[in-house]
Amino acid sequence: MAIGIGTDHAADRTLEPGTASSPWPPRRSRVLRLPRSAKMLSGLGILTFFLLWAIIGPFVAPYSPDQTFANSAVPLPPSGAHLLGTTALQQDVLSQLLVGGGSTILVSLIAGVIATMLSVAIGVSAGYLGGLADDLLSMLANIFLVLPALPLLIILFGFLGHSGSNNELVVGLIIAVTGWAFGARVLRAQTLSLRNRDYVDSARIIGESRLRIIATEILPNLTPVVATSFLFTTLYGVGTYTALAFLDLVNPNWSWGGMLFYGQLSNAEVAGYWWWFVPPGLAVALLGSSLALLNFGIDEFINPRLRAAGLARRAGRREWARARRRPEIGLTPVIRSAGGGHDG
Amino acid sequence: MTGEALLEIQGLCVDYGLGPDAVHAVDGADLVLHRGEALGLAGESGSGKSTLAMAATRLLRPPGVITGGDVRLHSDNGAVVDLLEADFAGLRVLRWSQVSLVLQSAMNALNPVFTIRAQLTDALTAHLPQLSKRDRLARAVELLEMVGISGDRLGSHPHELSGGMRQRVMIAMALALRPQVVIMDEPTTALDVVTQREILEELKELRDQFGFAILFITHDLSLLIEIADSIAVMYAGRLVERAPAASLFKAPRHPYTLGLLSSFPPLHGPRIPMTGIPGSPPDLRQLPSGCVFHPRCRFAFDRCAAEAPPLVTIGTGGSRLVACWQQAPDRPVPAEIAAPEPDQQLLPLTTAPAQKETTPVTGAASAATAAAAEHGSPA
Amino acid sequence: MRTLARRLAFYLVTAFIAVSLDFFIPRLIPGNPVDAVLAKMQGVTITKATINALELQFGVGTKASLWAQYTHFWGNLLHGNLGVSVSNGFAPVSTVIRGALPWTLGLVGFATLISWLLGTLIGALVAWRRGSWLDNLLPVTTFFQAAPYFFLAFLALDLFSTKLGWFPSGQGHSNLDFPAFNWTYLSDVLDHAVLPALTIVVASAAGWIVTMRNVMLTTMDEDYVLIAAAKGLPKSRVVWYAARNAILPSVSGFSLAIGFIVSGALLTEIVFSYPGLGLLLVDAVGDNDYALLQGLFLIITFAVLAANLIADFVYVFLDPRTRQEA
C-alpha cells in the first residue's frame, strides 16, 4: 500500500491506534512511542513535583500544622516566621499546606486506581460479553453516571460521621464507587469495536478461552484509554475529595480542602486573608491541571486528527510563520518559495 | 479534444506540510481540460490525482500547500482567472457556478443534519440572491427530477436515502448552477456495481444534455471506458500519459499504463494472462531517481534511472502525451507499447456532446440572464 | 420518539434507585443516626413524638419490618412529606427546601446556560482559527477547569467584593429589601447574583470550550464542510455547516456535565452564603440534620435527572438521525 497521504477517502476514520486497514493487531510498541509534546511534559513535571511534595512535605514543614502560636487575634499575613502567614487559630499556613498535600494525593490516587479497576472490569466485560450481561452492566453504569456524585457522597459521608471517614483508603474507595462509570462506558465502546476485529475473531475460532482473549488481544490495545481514564478519575478524585473536606465531611490528616473549610469558617475571603485560602486552592488547581494536561497529551496521541493538528503545528512551524499563513478551508495556500528542487 | 481549453494546469507542484519533512504529492503536473470534454484521471491510491484536482481549485485541506505552477480557468464570460492568485472572494464567485465537485461518499459529503432541500438551495441562495424562495424550491425540485428522484424527497435527510440516491443527489447538487466543469472524485467507488452502472448512464445522459466537462478521477480504468473521451494517467505525483480513451486502451504508450491495463481481466474475448505490476508504489518521501517508475518497469534501461523523462507530445494530432524514454525518437520502441492507433470509429464511446446554447450562470454579472435562464431552461 | 420514551423510562428507574438509596443508606451505615441528631441538639426541647418520627425516618428501633418501612417511606414521599428539619425549627423539610429551591434554580440554570453558550462559541472559534493565538487559551481553561468552584468563588469574593467593592459580599439580597416584583428588589437580586454566576460560568465554561474545540477540529475535516466551501458559500455559512454538527456531542455531554456543575454550584452558593440549596446543605451537615440531607439529595437528584431529560429532548431535536422510527 502506498503511504497514505489522505487522497484515498476510504482511509480509516476511527480513533484507535490499531487501524481498520490492517488485520494484524498493533503491537505494544505503538503505545510506548509517546509524543514529546509540551502539554505532556509540563503535566508530567508538575505531577512529579506534587508527588514529591506529598512524600517529603511533612518532613520539610517548619512546624506542626496543629501547633498554635498565640500571638494575635486575627490571622497574620506572611512574615519571616510564617512564610505563608497564620490561620485564625494562629497555626502556620505553610506547614498545613505541606502536610495537607499527602492526604489529597493519596486519596485521589487510591480513588483513581480502584475506579479504573472497576471500570476496566465492568466496561470490558460489558463490551465483550454482549447480550444480557452487556445490557445490565450498561444500565448500571448509566445509572451511576447520571446520579450526581457529590450529593450522594454527602449523604454517605454525612451518615458515616467522623468514625469511618478519616481513613484514606475508605474515603478513596467510596469516591471510586461514584467515579468508575465514565471510564466503563468508554472502555465498553472501545472493547465493542475491538471485539469485531479479525484477530480477535481468529483467536476465538482457534478456541482460546475468553479470559485469555481479553487479556492478550484486547487489553493491550486499550492501554491509552485506560491511562486516560485513570487520569480523569484521579482528577475527579482530587476535586471531590477537596469538596468533601471543604464541607468538613472528611478530614483524615489535614488536607487542602480542610484548610479551605476553616478559612471559610472564619470568612477569610471576605476579610481578605488571601494567604490562607489562595495557597491551598492554587495547589489543588495546579495538581488538577497537571493531570488534565497529561490527559490532553494522551488524547492527542489517541485521536489522529488532534495529533495531526498538533504535529502540523510543530513541524514546519517556522516555515508557516514565515509564510504568515493560517491553514484555511477552501483557500489552499500558495507558497512558491517552498517549492524548488523538483525536476520536470 | 473538443472545444478550446477550459482549465489549464501547468507545472503544478503540491506538497503536504512545509519544511524538510514535506511530502511532494504532485510534482510538475500538466493537464488541460477542454470545454465539454470528459477527461479521466487515473492512477493508484497515493498517485496524487485527487490532490491535483483539489489543489487546482484551492480546495486542498491543510496541511496541503501549493508550491509552484499555474492554474487558469476560462470563465464563460470570457475572462481568464488565475486560480492560484485569486483570493477567497474571487474564488467564491467561481465556485459551483463554474466548477463544482462530486465526492466519493455521499454519506460523508452530505450534511447529516440538514434537509436535501436546504443542501440543494444553499448554493442558489449564495450565488443568486435575487431568486425568490419559490423559484429556489422549484429549481430544487427540477434538479431532483433531473436525476430521477421524486420531488417529495426534498424534506428528507441524507440518512433516509439509499446510497445510490444520495450519490444522485450529489450529482444534482453539483449541477445546480450549470457549471462548466464538474470534478468527480471516485463518485461511484462506494457503490455496488449495479448502481454504479446506473449512475454512469445517468451521467452520460446529463452530459449529453448540458454539455459540461467532467474531470473523472478514479483508480478503476474500466469505468473510464464507459465515460471518458480522454484519459490521463498519474503515477507518484506525475502525469505519465495522456491520450484519447480508445487510443489509451488499445495502444498504450507508457509501461505503467500497460501494466494497469493488464491488471484487470476483460469479461469477453480470449483469455489473456494477467501480469499486473511488480513491486509497490514508492514512498513519496523517498522517490527513486530519474523516472519514478523505473524500479517497477520491465523496459527500464540506464537512462531511466539517471534522468526523469519529460511529458512530450508524440505521434500526430497532438493529443497523445507520454513521459517515457522508450518513446524517445532515437530508440526502437518495444512492441507492447507501440501498438498501432485504433480506428477511432470502431469503438463505441461517448460522442462529442452537441453544442447546446446554454446560458451558464455566473455569480456576479448577468443577473438578468440568470433569472431568464432559471425560468426559461428546460429541465 | 422511541428513544425519548426509553430515556424517560431510564430516568424513572434511576429516580427509583435514588429513592431507594436514600432509604437504605441511613440503615446500612453503622451507628445510630437518631443519637447523632440528638447529640447536636443540646439545649433544645424535643417532644417524644418528634423522636418517634425521627426513629421511623431512619428505621431505628422500630418493630416494623424493612418492607413496611420502605413502603411507608414511599408513601410519605409521594405525599410530599420528607420529614422534619431539625436545624430549621422542626419545619417540614419540604417547606424548607421549597424556600431555597427557586434561588438555586435561578442561579444555576441561568449560569449553566450562559456557560454552555459561551463555551461552545469560544470552542468553535478556537477550532476554526486553529494556529492562531486563541490556541493559547487552552492551558488557561485547563487551569480553570481544575480549580475547585469554591476556590474560584473565594477569589471572586476577595477580588471583586472585598478589594474592589464592586459587588456585595454574599447572600441573595440585602436584608432591607422585601421580596416583591419591583425593580429595586430585582436589581438587588441581580446584583447579588453576578459574582456567584460569574464563578460558575468561569469554572464550567472551560469544559465546553475544550469539548467543542476538539469536536470542531474533527468535524472540519468532514467532506460536507469541504463541499460547503466548494459551493462558494460565505465563510460564516461554512462554519455553521461544521458547528451545527459539532454541537451535538456538547449537548449529549451536557448530561454528564450537569451533575458536576450542580455540585460545584452548590459549593459556590456556600461561599457566597447564597440562600439556595447549598447553604441548606452545609447547615444540615453541620447539625446532623439527616432528614434535610435526605430531602436535599432527592431534590437535587431529581433536578439533575430532569435537566438530563431536557437535554435529551434538545438532542433529538437537533439530530435528525435519532428521529428515525425503527
Image (cartoon, rainbow, N blue to C red):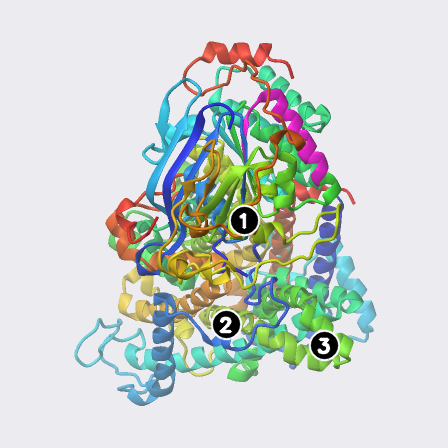
The residue lying toward the viewer, choosing from B136 and B43, is B43
Q: Amino acid at mark 1?
A: Ile
Q: Amino acid at mark 2?
A: Gly
The residue lying furthest to the left in this view is A80
Residue B269 in view: yes
Q: Residue at x 43, y 83 (%)?
A: A253
Q: Is residue B214 left or right of residue B24?
A: right
At label 3, counting other C-alpha atoms closer than 10 Å, the crowd grade (few under 14, some 14-19, many 20 or more) is some
Q: Which mark is residue A203?
A: 3
How many marks the image carries: the answer is: 3
Q: Position of residue C142 (x, y in %)?
A: 39, 61
Q: Position of residue A160 (x, y in %)?
A: 59, 77
Q: Are marks 1 and 2 in contact (CB under 8 Å)?
A: no
**Mark 2 = which residue?**
A237
Foreground mark, 1 or 2?
1
In the image, residue B205 lies in the stretch drawn in magenta: yes
Q: In the image, is residue B372 above or below residue C321?
A: above
Q: Which residues are magenta?
A: B196-215
Q: Residue at x 36, y 78 (%)?
A: A50
| Quarter of the picture holding the C terminus of chain C | top right
| Quarter of the picture holding the N terminus of chain C | top right
Q: In the image, is residue C70 above or below residue A170?
A: above
Foreground mark, 1 or 3?
1
Q: Residue at x 47, y 49 (%)?
A: B48
Q: Position of residue A102 (x, y in %)?
A: 41, 82
Q: Position of residue B191 (x, y in %)?
A: 69, 44
